[in-house]
Each structure stands twice: as C-alpha cells, then as structure tokens.
Image (spheres, rainbow, N blue to C red):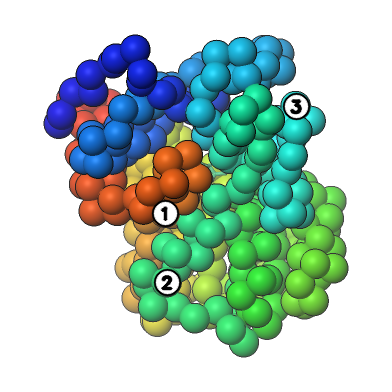
Amino acid sequence: MVKPVITGRTKLVGILGHPITHTLSPAMHNAAFAALGLDFAYLPFDVRPEELKNAVAGIRALSIVGVNVTVPHKETVLDSLDVVTEAAGLIGAVNTIVNHDGRLTGYNTDAIGFLKALEDTGFDPRGKEAAVLGAGGAARAVGAALGMSRIRRITFFNRTLERAKELAQMVAGATGVQSTAVPWEEMGKSGMSIIRSADIVVQTTSIGMHPREAECPPVPADAFRKDQVVVDLVYNPAPTRFLKRAAAAGARTQDGVRMLLHQGAAAFELWTGRPAPITVMENALKTAQAASQVAEHP
Ligand code: NAP
C-alpha cells in the first residue's frame, strides 16, 4: 500500500463514530486518493455522543472537506447541519457531510450504495416482495431505496415494533409502496411464510456483527429458499452466521462489503468531484478486512 504523504496543501476528510477502531473506510479512501494522486488524507475520529456538536463545529473550524458519519451519530447529526438533502431528510439519517465554505450539507449515500450493490447481484426490485429485518438507520435507507425502485411490497420485522410501524408509514407515504410492520418474534412463527415468499430478504440489524458473531436473527433455515436473494448489511464478519444459513439453503447471498464499497464511492465523488476508482477501493477493502480478521483471530 502507498503511504500518504502529508503536505501543507493536504485536504482532510474522515469518519465520525463511536467506537471507530473497526472501520475499514480509511483504508478504502486513502488507497483511492493515492491511486488518483489526490492530496487528501482520511482519518478516523472517535467522537463520543456528548461531543458530536463540538466535532461538527470542528469540521467548519478546521476547514475539513467532509466526513462520513457512522453509528451512533447518523440520526443525531442532522440537527447540527446547515442543509440536508431531500433523500437524507426522508431517511432521517446522514452518513456523509460535505463542507461547502463552512456550510455543511448532509447526504445519505447508504441508499444508493445499497442499490448499486444489489445491481451487482443482478436483482431487479421492480414488482417484487421484500422482507427487511430491522428498522434502524440502515433499514430506513434500504426501505427508501427499495421503495424508490418500485418494489411491490415490503415487510419490516423489528424488535421495537413502533419503530417498524413508523418506517413502514414513511415508505408507504413517500413511495406509495405497500409496507407493513411485523413483530420480531413472529419471524419463526406466522412471519415465516412472509420470509419464504419474499424475493429478497435484507438483514439490516447489527446482530451477528463482531464481537457478536455467534448471534443470528431467529429465521429458521427452512424459511429460506433456492434463488431467493438474501443480503446481510453486516461486513464484519463477512459472511455472518445468518448469511451462511441462507447460502446453505440455496439462496443467492451478498454480504455488506459491496454496499460499504458503493456508499464509500458515492461519498468519495461528493468530496473530490472525481469518479471513484472502484477496483482500487474494493481491493483495499478486501486487504483491510483480511488484516482485521487476522488481528482479531491471530
Ligand atoms: P441502528 O440504527 O442502531 O439500528 C439497529 C437495528 O438493529 C435496530 O433495528 C435494532 O432494533 C436492531 N437490533 C440490534 N440488536 C438487536 C437484538 N439483539 N435483537 C433484535 N434486534 C436488534 O444501526 P444501523 O445504523 O441501522 O446499523 C445496523 C447494521 O448495519 C450495523 O451492523 C452496521 O454496521 C450495518 N451497516 C452496514 C452498511 C454497509 O455499508 N454495509 C451501512 C450501514 C449500516 P430496535 O429498533 O429494537 O433497537
């Protein structure tokens, strides 16, 4: 890997999250800057929730070009921004900020990242049925993306049912797509037929994410079927236990790395105005992911 050289003209970008040591984004973006010869550097910033407003003020004060925003700040950061795009406002979450001369605009590139990753599987959402596990920030991006892609029906399963109901209403209101909320515990009971008949199942919760690799949403193995598309947004580990279970049942599976790549590429283009070098970013992600798995399981 080419080490970035910091100069007096280096432009700074980064990521705000807490915790942040797990992030693969610095490797992906710094490799892309190096490949295109751009004098940019990408750093991780561990920002505790009570420091988020100060951190956002710091973007302006330090003339930082922009940042990614990750768990747990994607929703709370909206209050500190000057402008939020229509899509990010609808989703209710921002994962990318661009600093235009001190004016901070919030974007959501998760939705486009999810759709681009889905394109890689060859799946066309038009007229299909989806089951989405979760109703957090990532589920909101997935719901909006599927709704805008004219899927026919979406069912959201969530532990906190109220959150799923609110999301289903948002998607139905904004896109006209039939959307319903079902309690999480129904997944292995009456909800099983919904999962079995879905053309696509998207796992958007943090279940199964490091260090909870042993955990898995309670979808019985026989709820999956051959040729169904099953996506898990978790990228560490990749694949998760959930995805392995779906693959064993014959489903076509995709882990969270493709979405991570495409949401990062969209952010890169917003900051630099240059087309993202996708292959370079993908290779950097794979290398960083392998290194982080070796570090955790030496
Ligand atoms: P979030 O807003 O905090 O939402 C978390 C979701 O997980 C909620 O639906 C929550 O249910 C559910 N959940 C957590 N623990 C649970 C448990 N023990 N049992 C049942 N449900 C549980 O987080 P987020 O931003 O949506 O992120 C979720 C995951 O997506 C993370 O793993 C993140 O890394 C991943 N992600 C990946 C990408 C990518 O590019 N691949 C992009 C975005 C996010 P409640 O509502 O009941 O709390």
Q: Earlier in the sequence, mark 3 or mark 1?
A: 3
Quadrant of the rendered image containing residue 183: bottom right
Q: Locate the N terminus and report the quarter of the image it occupies.
A: top left
Residue at x 73% of width, y 31% of height: 81
Quadrant of the rendered image containing residue 225: bottom left
Question: Residue 162: image x %, image y %?
Answer: 84, 51
Q: Mark 3 falls on what kind of element?
A: helix
Q: Nearer the viewer, residue 19 or 89?
A: 89
Residue 202 vertical placement versus 283 (above, below): below
How far separated are the C-alphas under marks 2 and 1? 11 Å
Q: Locate the C terminus and report the quarter of the image it occupies.
A: top left
Position of residue 120 in the picture relative to residue 266 (left or right) = left
Q: Which residue is mark 3?
A: 80
Q: Is residue 54 visible?
A: yes
Q: Is mark 2 within 8 Å of ligand 1?
A: no
Question: Residue 107: image x %, image y %?
Answer: 62, 45
Q: Which residue is mark 2?
A: 119
Position of residue 35 in the picture relative to residue 43 (left or right) = left
Q: Which residue is mark 1?
A: 262
The amino acid marked with disc number 3 is: Ser
Q: Mark 1 falls on what kind of element?
A: helix
Is label 3 in contact with label 2 (beta carbons under 8 Å)? Answer: no
Residue at x 61% of width, y 48% of height: 108
- Ligand 1 resides in the quarter of the picture at top right
Q: Is mark 1 within 8 Å of ligand 1?
A: yes
Q: Mark 2 falls on what kind of element?
A: helix
How far separated are the C-alphas under marks 3 and 2? 33 Å
Near mark 3 (Cα within 10 A), the count class, few <14, some 14-19 or many ≥20, is some
Question: Residue 27: image x %, image y %?
Answer: 29, 32
Q: Nearer the viewer, residue 245 or 143?
A: 143
